[in-house]
Image (tube, rainbow, N blue to C red):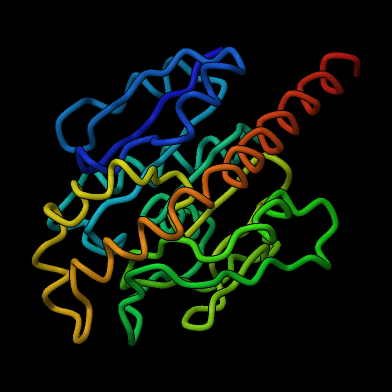
Amino acid sequence: MFAHVVQHIAFEHLGNLEPVLRKHGYSINTFMAGVDELGPISEDDPDLLIVLGGPIGVYETDAYPYLETELQLIRDRIARNRPVLGICLGCQLIARALGADVYPGGTKEIGWAPLEIHSDVEGNVLAPMQQATDVLHWHGDTFELPAGATLLASSAVYPNQAFRYRDTVLALQFHLEVEPEALESWYLGHAHEIGSVDGLTVPKLREDGQRYGPTLQGPAQQVWVKWLESLSAQDTVAAVA
C-alpha cells in the first residue's frame, strides 16, 4: 500500500503518524508543495492521501497557485471515495474542497488547550483523545462545517476542530501528529507568528509542550490505528462485495 503525503513546510511532517503507517504496511512518498510536481499523485492513485499543515491560507491561491492543484486533487479523491487525511491547512483544504467557507478567524489559536470530543457521535475515531489533556493548536483560520460532514471535536475558541466525511475522509484542525522532540523546530520556524500574539511566549509554549506532549502520544497512536483499521475494514467489505 502507498501513502502519498503533501507537505508544505519542512518541520511540519508526519511526526508520530509515520511509524503507525509503516507498521500497517504503507510505503510513504512525500511531495513538497510548491517544489514537487503533484500530478503523479493523481496518476499513482495511492491508497491514502495525507495533506499536512502550513502557515498559509486556503484562500491565498494567487500567491500560492499550487493550492488550486491540491484542492482539485482532494476533490477528485473524494468524488471517487478514496481515503484522505488532512491536518491543519490540510483540514481547511478538505473543507474548501467540499464547498465550505474558509476564512481568517478573529483569534489566533496557538498553544496547548483542551479539546472537546463529541462522544455522542457513533464510531468517533477521536474517542481515545478523551484520555488526553491538552492538544497543540496552531492556526489563525477557521472554516464552516461542510454539508454532509460529521463534527467530531470542538475547542473553546473554535467549534469546528475535526470532522469526517463519509467513511474515508478525516480532517483535523489541531496537531495530533506532533512529537515533543520536534517542537523546538516549530518555535524557530514560527518565531514571527509567536511574536505577533499578545502574551504568547516560547518559554510558555516549551513548558506546555514538555507537560502535555508526552501524554498526547498514546492517545494519538490509538486514533491513527483506529482510523487506518477502519479503512482496511472498508476495503475488505468492498472486496467481498
| Residue 83 x/y as whole percent | 60, 34
**Front one among 79 and 236:** 236
**Front one among 13 and 86:** 13
Q: Is residue 31 above or below residue 2?
A: below
Could you tell me which quadrant the C terminus lies in? Answer: top right
| Residue 58 x/y as whole percent | 31, 60
Q: Quadrant of residue 138?
A: bottom left
Q: How many marks?
A: 0
Q: In the image, what residue occupies the spot 20% across and 26% down?
A: 36
233 to the left or right of 60:
right
Could you tell me which quadrant the N terminus lies in? Answer: top right
| Residue 80 x/y as whole percent | 62, 33
Q: In the image, what residue occupies the spot 35% across and 42% down?
A: 70
Q: Quadrant of residue 203?
A: bottom left
218 to the left or right of 138:
right
212 to the left or right of 20:
left
Whether residue 203 appears in this view of the structure is yes
Whether residue 96 appears in this view of the structure is no
Q: In the image, what residue occupies the spot 47% across and 48% down?
A: 214
| Residue 232 x/y as whole percent | 73, 23
Q: Is residue 90 above or below residue 201?
A: above
Q: In the image, what residue occupies the spot 70% across and 62% down?
A: 150
17 to the left or right of 63:
right
